[in-house]
Amino acid sequence: MPESYGADSLTVLEGLDAVRKRPGMYIGTTDSQGLMHCLWEIIDNSVDEALAGACDHITVTLHADGSVEVADNGRGIPVDVEPKTKLTGVEVVLTKLHAGAKFGNSSYNAAGGLHGVGSSVVNALSSRLDVEVDRDGKTHHMAFHQGHPGVYADADPAHPSPDSPFKRTRRNKPTELEIVGKVSPKTTGTRIRYWADPEIFNDTARFSYEQLIDRVRQTSFLVPGLKITVIDEHIPETGDASVDELREIDDQTPDETDTFVSEGSDADTADTMGGSEMSEAVAVAKADAAGHTHRRVEEFCHTGGVRDFVDFLSNGEPVSDIWRVSGQDTYVEETQAVGENGELHAQKVKRDCGVDIALRWVNGYDTVIRSFVNVVETPGGGTHVDGFLLSLTKQIRKTVEDNARKLKVNLKDPAQKVERDDIMAGLVAVVTVRIAEPQFQGQTKDVLGTAQVKPIVTKMTDRQFGEMITGSKRGYKEQSGRVLDKIVGEMHARIQARKTKEVTRRKNALESASMPPKLSDCQPGNDDVAELFIVEGDSALGTAKAARNSAFQALLPIRGKILNVQKASLAQMLSNKECAAIIQVVGAGSGQSFDIDQARYNKIIMMTDADVDGAHIRILLLTLFYRYMRPLIEAGHVYAAVPPLHRIALAGSHKGEFIYTYSDDELAGKLADLDKRRISYNPDIQRYKGLGEMDADQLADTTMDPRTRMLRRIRMEDAAEAAGIFSLLMGDDVPPRKAFIVDNADDFDRSKIDT
């Protein structure tokens, strides 16, 4: 029999207890992702002060004891008593769900923390939270334990701890803020320090410094002029700086166009500052260096807004300058307003919508679109991104049709129609809107749902981008021509790739007339284990044919060094016979249309001579795979064969045995070992100048037979870093490549060179 069910079976969770009971409803997860989400909520509240024009400096400190502190010089949380609850503003903000100044229409015209649960949820999920507010010439302090106000008895007030004795304020008794100091009447701001509760977050939850830096840098782009300082105390402190160190800081004082890197930061996290910001940063660095300072202190401040953001995100040779679409418009929205007595009623409100979009095209087919609403990122896009892409597609299609003859587009061919994927290839864009009380899909704010934003963004993009892409706006004619050429080139490449895919899908590979005549294909039916050897030169092809297992090993020879596709256009790549043959033989298309499931081989093996020219050919082939068939590398299907350099023929009792070595150092070591062990060998050591000098059985044993060969799998663990390396080493820009070689010359290690 089921237990009796009555009113006494019901449980009522009051205040923040509901948050602690179901934390996933508010922060998604209780692992590292949820931990970082709490930090974003506190940071966003400070950023909202900056958006309101009341704050220009935020400091985020990761304390050594595991706590996090966010400080700003905004207006400070209100400290007066809220009439309805009879509690101070600080306690209302930190203990009441859906309470704050962002539900009205005056205090914040655009805000990131919009659901009124951010600070109170963080408070509920913290074992301790301390808040200090500078207002009215005083510093006010208040403490909480798991969301409940009270007083901690810290043994050392300078080092507060969540483990200190805590006395909870009696229920329903208003808690007065403690005044702990005095400040200038003009000084305002808020400092929140909290310790995440281990009872809520699992053992794997960790703060990610890298995620924090990415988010802070992103915010500094979106709020021009806002300075954000990040301090990480987990790195040990340094001692007193020497005179030489202070002099070194003076020597490193940058000019207005230089980059300032704070102590302990990596070069890739440096940011360009204006003269005043750099002078201040250098002064701070000198002051810190004079005493004990934290090694990892990074500051971010940008004045160019989304234009600087797009420049930061761009990876590759630019096809156009950075274009800007911006403006202001209004819309009417029906919303629930709070009356004088706290009741809700429907009313129509006129809203302002600010739009700021920056975009450019770069050489390549990767698409980078970052979208934001009031500095809150919307990874899933939303109505603002939909409106932007709708207008972008419409305007480009219209311009291509108007210039069809010049662009060599056959309008009578239904296949020759620009698709959105053609437009998106190489596009880098940042789309931002600022509106009051936006509607998001879910608490995590991934997708903007405010419908009225879409027509505003569409109309604004139609007018401003339309003038740019048609070249009617002064200074854009040449750029728009390059952009249209690229987009049409992508269209032709997509059409050609589709045709290539259709002709390379074979039922019987040996009967396929579309394959290059030099391809020595393997037998059909072995797709799961099929291997394609890309062989350097026709001379090596003859030996490889005799050495291979034709049941599953195919051979495709190439003549010399193929085209460097990092410097070439799509049209140049497709017209190159060697590149086109490789793409055709692989059979899975290229670029964005590449479909790895259609690849005809399980392994693609680059088999080149063991010399400098062979290494160069391998990197050229690898550049082709990276730019146009990248999923093959990502899935681990691309390999480099490792042919030997030397062959040692043993003598005496070991006659008929052979030892292969792969470098001069290995040869010297192996010969010394044989001499030490008194094993005789033929002093006439055979050195292979190329694959063609090997006998078929030698090539099979050392390089082609899966039972005895050695292969090197090409891996790509960091896509962004790989893209940067390819652009640096294989691109058109010579000075950075020269600087890279010079800077790394001292670290040269022959063992790391694939020769």
Image (cartoon, rainbow, N blue to C red):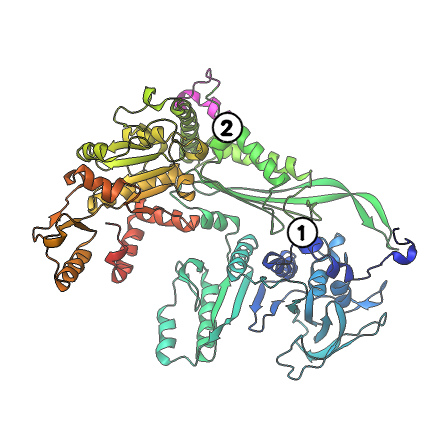
Cα distance in 3D space between marks 1 and 2: 35 Å
Of residue 474 and residue 703, the one placed in the foreground of this image is: 703
Provide the residue designation for mark 1: 110
Q: What element carries label 1?
A: loop
Where is residue 121? Give x, y as percent: 71, 60
Camera sees residue 449: yes
Up-down relation of residue 38 to residue 422 (above or below)? below
Of residue 12 and residue 479, the one placed in the foreground of this image is: 12
Up-down relation of residue 227 to residue 584 (above or below)? below
Q: Residue at x 85, y 46 (%)?
A: 345
Where is residue 597? Give x, y as percent: 45, 33
Q: What stretch is highlighted in magenta?
A: 397-414
Instruction: List the single residue furthest toward the top.
Output: 412
Where is residue 16? Give x, y as percent: 77, 62
Provide the residue designation for mark 2: 419
Of residue 4 and residue 381, the one placed in the foreground of this image is: 4
Q: Quadrant of residue 386?
A: top right
Q: Which residue is drawn at 50% across and 57% down?
A: 302
Instruction: List the single residue furthest toward the front.
Output: 653
Up-down relation of residue 516 to residue 244 (above or below)? above
Left or right: where does residue 32 sit relative to residue 76? left
